[in-house]
Image: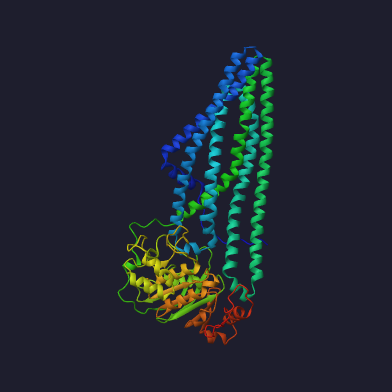
Amino acid sequence: MTEAPTPLLPIATGARVRVVIATLLRRHRGRAVATAALFLVASALGVVLPACLGRIVDAVSNDAGIAVVTGWVVAAGAGAVGAALAMLWAARVLAGLVQDVLADLREDVFASAMRLPVSTVDDGETADLLSRVTGDVDAVAEAGGNVVPVLLSAGFAIGVSVIALTALDPWLALAGVASVPFYVLGTRAFLRRSRVVFREVRVREAARSQAVLEAVEGIETLTALGEQDHALERVSTRAEDSIRMQVEGVRVRNRLFRWINGGELVGLSAILATGFLLHASGAVTVGMVTTAALLFHRLFDPVGQLIFGLDDIQRAAIGLARLVGVIDLAPAAPRGAPRGAGDSRPAARQAVGIELRDVAYRYPTTGRGISDVTLSIAPATTTALVGSSGSGKSTLARVIAGHHPPTSGVVNLVPETTVPYCLSQELHLFRGTIADNLRLVAPTATHDQMVAALIAVGAEWAIASLRRSPGTPSCSTHSGTDTGIGTDSGTDTGIATDEGRIQQLAIARALLADPAVVILDEATADVGLPHRDAVEAAIRVLRRDRTTVLIAHRLEPVSTADQIIVFAEGRAAQRGTHRELLAVDGLYRRFWLAQTEAPQPDRHPNAHRHPNEQRETP
């Protein structure tokens, strides 16, 4: 049975998409008008060649002489060259226009995506937003760079050719209309079916990506629960659904091809038959019939490009609708520069406790979330949240962080002005120097403070580069959450960086922020095995004397927590210390035994040991 995809982010209407595109074009109104004028001139010059060829036929039929024929040949050549040059100029101007419009669209989409509330992104499958800011942006960019120039050229060529054919002889133009029903019926059938098919293709691709992400990110928990086969079956089912829809899309296009070929055959046959009758009555010359046939034949490529391009236009339109949905969903950008965390830090950090009473949170679309969570976290202690993907542990952490207001219940942080600092699994190296990266959360940090933070997290390798860093930060200030678009390959830190070093810098940044409450959401998930020990040692330093909420699939760092909460289906199924939970038969014990006893070929040889055991020495 086909699995129904989880509800996704909204998709804008066609009318709304047209408004957004019109707004983007208005920013470049001058070039848009110039582009249209150049394509019109190029299309008009393209009519010169068939017109001259018709004149040559008449000149030869009437024995007009070599000079007349030569004149029309030169005129035909001049028209062809002029049309080619005008088209090249138009394409060049259009290319710049399209790239600027696409750049504006990308900036709007990414800016909107960064402003989306966490609860909105989490309400559904996270791969939906990922597929929009990657696959849909690529689809729109490809259509803008490759399809739009072709379709714009085809549209002007069709319009000019139809006008020229009508001016030549209305009856010949009317004969060409015989092809129109084929084009109309084929196009209507294509649009009616492809609109549904291509939308489903994008939705099922997002669903497939989500299944893959969940299987990869939760592999250890899935292994512990013995649900690997179920996860693989889910990936396989969604992949088959995606492939099935893509095959259906090919069938839809093939049906359109048959309609178009039939229209070309009928139209050209009708023009030649009508031309024969008109010539027999003396109404037109052989050259005029030749010109009409050439003008109609000239429509073959543009009409084909226009209709075949509807495939890409449909994909781009769906992509645009999904991107505009992100733009419309995001709240308006805040006015004024954001205030950095370093501007509002208290002079002295005080211990903070966390109390949750009957807390519930449900995502409005999917209904997933947490229920009836009552929890007390003592100041300067570590509480670990564990469970399978979708069990509710990350949702609870975001409720504590203030990203999700609870649907019911009470969350108290004492004092209430405390802003938790969140460190996620994503790796973020920002453009600039080491000092720039560290001062994101503490703009006034001194050199000695930065050196102390680097030494504390074991990042002595960065100190030499830090000495070469300019004293004035060049990056914007940062709030209480360590986020970003991702690792910036264009960064200029002056040193070689890997996953472990990037996360060490992030932890040093957190130390400089000096928060009272830290939320660590799978902070080592994307760190390679060679660097994991160093990063976990840095995290232990960060946890010291701070109220910490730790989320992890791996249970070794969890085992040192003061209390462990095991989540299942949005509720706290177990709670206690590592020793207490191992003493009873339950989810935690099964997780632990699966991770410490099952063979794990991709893990470090000492990865199965208890944190209190001695490491083997070679």
Q: Is residue 217 left or right of residue 246?
A: left
Residue 197 position (above or below residue 538): above
Q: Quadrant of the N terminus?
A: bottom right
Residue 149 can be seen in this image: yes
Q: Position of residue 221 (x, y in %)?
A: 59, 74
Residue 458's quadrant in the figure? bottom left
Of 180 and 562, the residue lying toward us: 562
Q: Position of residue 617 (x, y in %)?
A: 56, 82
- Image label count: 0
Give me the residue at 61% from left, 45% from top. 192
Image colouring: rainbow
Residue 173's quadrant in the figure? top right
Residue 548 position (above or below residue 59): below
Q: Position of residue 444 (x, y in %)?
A: 31, 67
Residue 332 position (above or below residue 192): below
Q: Is residue 209 left or right of residue 105?
A: right
Residue 358 can be seen in this image: no
Q: Is residue 467 left or right of residue 390?
A: left
Give me the residue at 48% from left, 32% from top. 38
Q: Quadrant of the C terminus?
A: bottom right
Of 452 and 526, the residue lying toward us: 452
Q: Seen from this angle, which residue lies furthest left? A: 347
Of 54 and 323, the residue lying toward us: 54
Of 88 and 351, the residue lying toward us: 88
Residue 274 position (above or below residue 100): above
Residue 305's quadrant in the figure? top right
Q: Position of residue 289 (x, y in %)?
A: 64, 21
